[in-house]
Amino acid sequence: MLTALRDRTLHRQVFALALPMVLSNITVPLLGLVDAAVIGHLDSAWYLGGVAVGGTMINVTFWLLGFLRMATTGLSAQAFGAGDKDAQAEVFVQGLALAWLLALLLVAFHQPVAGWIFQFSEASDAVKTYAAQYFSIRIWGAPAALANFVIMGWLLGTQNARRPMWLLIITNVANIVLDILFVIGFGWKVQGAALASVLAEYSGLILGLWFVSRHWLAHALPAWREKLGSVSNGMGRLLRLNRDIFLRSLCLQLAFTFMTFQGATLGDDTVAANAVLMSFLMLVSYAMDGFAYAMEAMVGKAIGARSRGELGRTLIGTTFWSLVISVLMTLVFVLFGSQIIALISDIPAVREEAARYLPWLSAVPLVAMWCFLLDGVFIGATRGREMRNSMFVATSCFFMIWWLFSEWGNHALWAAMLCFLAMRGLALAVIFAYQWQKNIFLESC
């Protein structure tokens, strides 16, 4: 272990993959802030509410289909590690075909889906009207948005994190610029905000395809036209992997959604305090995601090369830096948590309420890092079934803890969330330890 930690090449490799993804993640909340600022300066709160509701619908839909990126990363990393150019080409073509098929279904059925979702919303009629406008425009960006998942996953799997970074940054910056132009400059209001996002997604698609073509030519991969005829070969494995990751993501979304809605029943101050603390949790996820992405790419490459030694080095190097970052974030939350809360909200009741639950959040970085890292390990290994099953266990524990201690109110919710994060990591750690001991982890699914 000490020998691996003294290997500067390993540390450079980890940061070459992790740092670009952390930097690109920063643009995601920035885009949300600009959206809120631009729409929030219009003459009615209906517009902001409509964009918030419609944007949430779109974001959750696309987020649940994020398995396209994860599956593509693992499969392409394994093909890259094995030096199999045919497999690298097949993974990309199959992923793109599946993305566009799903996008076609979303566009075709978006109206009944939106109507069904709105039945569960207690928003005003005006907010629902603008949310429907936003959703009906944004959905036309699905072909580009889902294809970009595949492009990002494929580039990351082929050990290139800088191009996905630039893809995310340029897409989000284009979205911000077009947002300002269409909403403030042209006065297109909600429709302008939605159109800005759609055009930004297609600009990202063009840039992403250019990145892919450059890599394709540089590595002399087979012509993509040759792979169209065999696009169904091995599609069963891709569909099974995507199915398992989708179910895992659905459970994840269920836990976070329940926490938001259940918190809303505990009073306005509590739901506002939880919103402040959840922004801390998102900060942790943005930082840890970068190292999880690095783990996905490096583990997949090691498995493709059938190298137990390289896999071990990857685990040691990525875990070391994740632990360092987690300890630093914990110290920041413990020492400066109250000051950070004060920066986010100047309402005394919200500050006091958030500070009451801050100890729970201070434990999150050190608890959550394991589930992020092990997600990366199992995505790189394309072991979706284990991820799905461990998430089922963690979700069951989440609801069991909340039910057992529900009389604690919001403390029960945060205890359930911490248990949820811990069980995700623990379940995957047990599975990994068993498979590593039995020398079966390097075997592909």
Image (cartoon, helix red, strand yellow):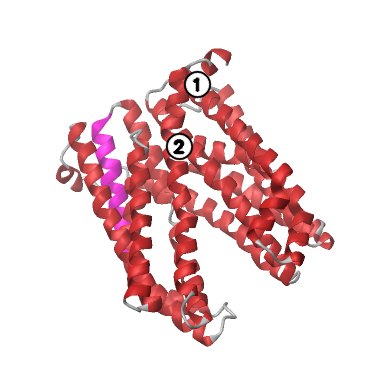
Q: Which of 321 and 86 is in front in this view?
A: 321
| Mark number displayed over residue 394 | none
Relative vertical location of residue 115 with respect to residue 9 in this rendering, above or below:
below
Q: If the image is split into quadrants, where does the C terminus sit?
A: top left
Q: Is residue 99 magenta?
A: yes
Q: Which of 104 and 369 is in front in this view?
A: 369
Residue 301 makes an appearance in the image: yes
Foreground disc of the pair 1, 2: 2
Q: Disc 1 and disc 2: Cα gap in Å?
A: 18 Å
- Where residue 178 appears, as percent x and y from the top left, is 33, 65
Residue ranking furthest to the bottom: 125
- Where residue 201 appears, as percent x and y from the top left, is 32, 59
Confirm or deny contact between disc 1 and disc 2 (CB under 8 A). Answer: no
- Whether residue 150 sits left or right of residue 368 in the image: it is left
Badge 1: how crowded within 10 Å, few (<14), some, or many (20+)? many
Badge 2: how crowded within 10 Å, few (<14), some, or many (20+)? some
| Mark number displayed over residue 19 | 2
Q: Nearer the viewer, residue 386 or 195?
A: 195
Q: Nearer the viewer, residue 282 or 333?
A: 333
- Where residue 218 appears, as percent x and y from the top left, is 19, 32
| Secondary structure type for disc 1 | helix
| Mark number displayed over residue 313 | 1
Residue ranking furthest to the top: 3
Residue drawn at (25%, 50%) of the image? 207
Instruction: Say what amino acid the circle numbered 1 marks.
Output: Arg
